[in-house]
Every structure is written in C-alpha cells, then in structure tokens.
Image (tube, rainbow, N blue to C red):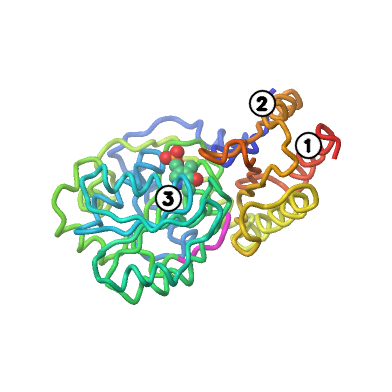
Amino acid sequence: MAKKLFIPGPVDVSPDTFEAMSVPMISHRGAEVSKLLEECNAGLNRLMHTNNTVFIFTSSSTGAMEAAVRNCVKDKCLSICNGAFSERWYGIVKENGKEADSLNFEWGEAPDPKRIEEKLSTGEYDALTLVHNETSTGVAAPIQEIARVVRKYDVSLLVDTVSSMGGVKIEVDKLGIDVCLFGVQKCMALPPGLAICSVSERSLEKANTIPGRGHYFDFLAYKKYLDKKQTPTTPAVSIMQGLRYKLNKILNEEGLENRFRRHEGMAEVTRRWAKKNFELLPEEQYSSNTVSCIKNTLNIDCNSLKTKLSERGYVFSTGYGKLVDKTFRIAHMGERTPEELREYLNTIDDILGL
Ligand SMILES: *Cc1c(COP(=O)(O)O)cnc(C)c1O
C-alpha cells in the first residue's frame, strides 16, 4: 500500500497525473514538443502572474538556484539566510566563485526588511537571494515588504518559491521578481525532475554581460532555443506532459484562488492543532501556508512516532538540519485535502494520547 506523504516534498502524485504522463514518447525536436512547451509556458505565466520568459529546466530546484546565481550575480550578492535552504543558496553563490555576504536571522525568524535595506544602501550588491518559504522552519518571508525595499536599488531580486509556488499567491510581476524559481514536486504535486524559472527582461540583458554562465543553465542559450519553441537539451518530456495536465487542472478546474484558499484552510487547521498541543516555531504572522514547523515542546520521541505513523500508512517529517530534534513538520501542500489532514492529525493524537 502506498503511504501518504506528509513531508514537504515530494508529495503524493494522483493516479490521473501519472496517467497523463503515460503517453507515447515524442521527439524532442518535433512539432508536438513545441506545442507541449508552449502550453506549459502559457500555464506557468498564469500560475506565476508574470509575462516574463519562463524556462523549464530538467533538474531539481537546486539546479535553478545555481542557474540564477551564474546568470545574475555580477559583482557581489547579498544572501538572506534564515534556514537551511537559504543557507544552501548562500553556499551556492560562493561555490560558483562569486562574492557574497550573508545576512543572518535566527532559524524560525522572518527576514527583516529594515535590516535588508541597511545592507543594500551600502551599494555593494548587485543581486539578492531570498527564500520565500523556508521549508526547514515553516517561515514565509514578508515578500511584499522585502520586494519593495529591493526595488529601490539596482539589485537583481532572486527568489526561491520552491515550496510555495502553486499553493500561495506570488505575483511575480507586481513584486518585480527578476528570477523566480520552483520545483514541480512540491505544491504542484508532480513527480520530481523539473525546475521552473521565470526571468525578467533586464535579467536577460544582465546575463549577457556576465561571463562564466556555464553550459547547462545558460539563460541566453535557453532563450535562443525557447524562441524556436525548443530546449537546448532533451527535456523530461514525460514530466512536461504531467505539467501541462496539472496546470490545466489547477487553472481551469480547481481555480487558483480556490487552491490558495484550500492551502490556507489546511494551514489554519494545522496551526490550531499545533497551538493546542505544542507551539509553532515561527511567529504566527509569518507561518507558512504550505508547511508547518512545530516545536516539540512535549519532548515526544519523533522517531517512534515516525515508525508508528508508518505502520498506519503515513510518512512523517522530522525537523530539518539543526532543528531535527527540536521540531517536526507537517506539510499541507499539493493535492492534500483538509479531510486527509484531519485524519492525519487525529492519528497523531491517537498515537500520542493527546
Ligand atoms: C525542497 C526545497 C529546495 C530543494 O529542492 P530540490 O528540488 O530538492 O533541489 C530548495 N528550496 C526550498 C525552499 C525547498 O523547499
């Protein structure tokens, strides 16, 4: 029996999605793939609220994080760090031989726009990396306030929305996000393997002035091929079939606003449960609508809980990195329903005797 995944990605993929992917293979240079790419792109533009160019990379999300850095960091980057994934991004900037400073916040805290402004006002930076939804801590950054600050400066705004895009409204163009990236195995509930990345016109112009963009993730190579409705290398065609199918379902069946409301509702249920029994790690106003990070204030044995939940058909998520023993997480993203979530919480209550 398949176990229900309550981890923050990958998440359960519905049988109809797998079915949509189980179609005959097509040439990656034919008319059919161009149509597939075009339709995926049209849907992604709507999902992301952007008219920017959108690239579909055959990689996990981390590939797109590296791509953003290689194409858009020129002299020096400011990396906002408040958890494991934002720290990873800071590492990626340095590993690619670029200069970077980190602006650190405690794990569980939201980045403070005022402190970001202080750093940017030095004029030292031409790019900034921000993780919108820190999956390791369940913190949703105040992206509107941060974007407003960044827009005052000539700084590329690079945003990881890996675990929020498709579950939370993120208006790329209104916010002025230069590069917005995510993977399809989280809120989109597809099998892993594709990373999506929107790129502003001015970022494409900037990339043209940056040497050493590498080969696989070169934005300009991608753009050249996209203009011919192709990708530079063989794309993960089957996952793209799934992506087209899911975009259509999300945009035309469930509807974006309904989808966002469903995620919000599930987050509220989880937060209420968490506050009754434990405590939330983030301040409530910064709590994510797609993943809740809960302080283990009862000192429960998370490994034993994980085993018992597994016996009952669930995959439980412990804390991440240095929070592994101090917190646990409940993902409520993708096609998860409020009913399934309640069943899961009831099962935990039952096991723990809450
Ligand atoms: C999952 C996740 C990543 C890494 O994604 P991969 O697809 O495994 O590369 C990066 N950032 C955030 C916020 C994530 O949740």
CB at mark 3 closer than 8 A to ligand 1? yes
Residue placed at 74% from the left, 49% from the top?
274
CB at mark 2 closer than 8 A to ligand 1? no
Residue that mark 2 sits on: 2
Residue placed at 32% from the left, 59% from the top?
78
The circle drawn on residue 3 is none
Q: Nearer the viewer, mark 2 or mark 3?
A: 3
Q: Which image quadrant is residue 124 in?
A: bottom left
Q: Nearer the viewer, mark 2 or mark 1?
A: 1
CB-based contact (under 8 Å), mark 2 and mark 3: no
Magenta extent: 167-171
Question: Which secondary structure class fits the magenta region best?
Answer: loop
Q: Secondary structure at mark 2?
A: loop
Q: Pointer 3: residues within 10 angstroms few (<14), some, or many (20+)?
A: many
Query: Quick check: can you spot residue 240?
Result: no
Residue 95 picture location, percent across and down: 26, 42
Give the camera-side residue of 56 and 87. Answer: 87
Say whether disc 3 or disc 1 marks the residue closer to the N-terminus: 3
Residue 242, placed above or below residue 25: below
Q: CA distance from mark 2 to mark 3?
A: 32 Å
Residue placed at 25% from the left, 57% from the top?
72
Give the camera-side residue of 244 and 214. Answer: 214
Query: Quick check: can you spot residue 146?
Result: yes
The circle drawn on residue 86 is 3
119 sits to left or right of 204: right
Q: Secondary structure at mark 3?
A: helix
Query: Dividing the image into 4 quarters, which one contains the C terminus?
Result: top right
* Amino acid type, mark 2: Ala
CB-based contact (under 8 Å), mark 3 and mark 1: no
The circle drawn on residue 348 is 1
Residue 98 picture location, percent across and down: 22, 50
Residue 81, placed above or below residue 151: above
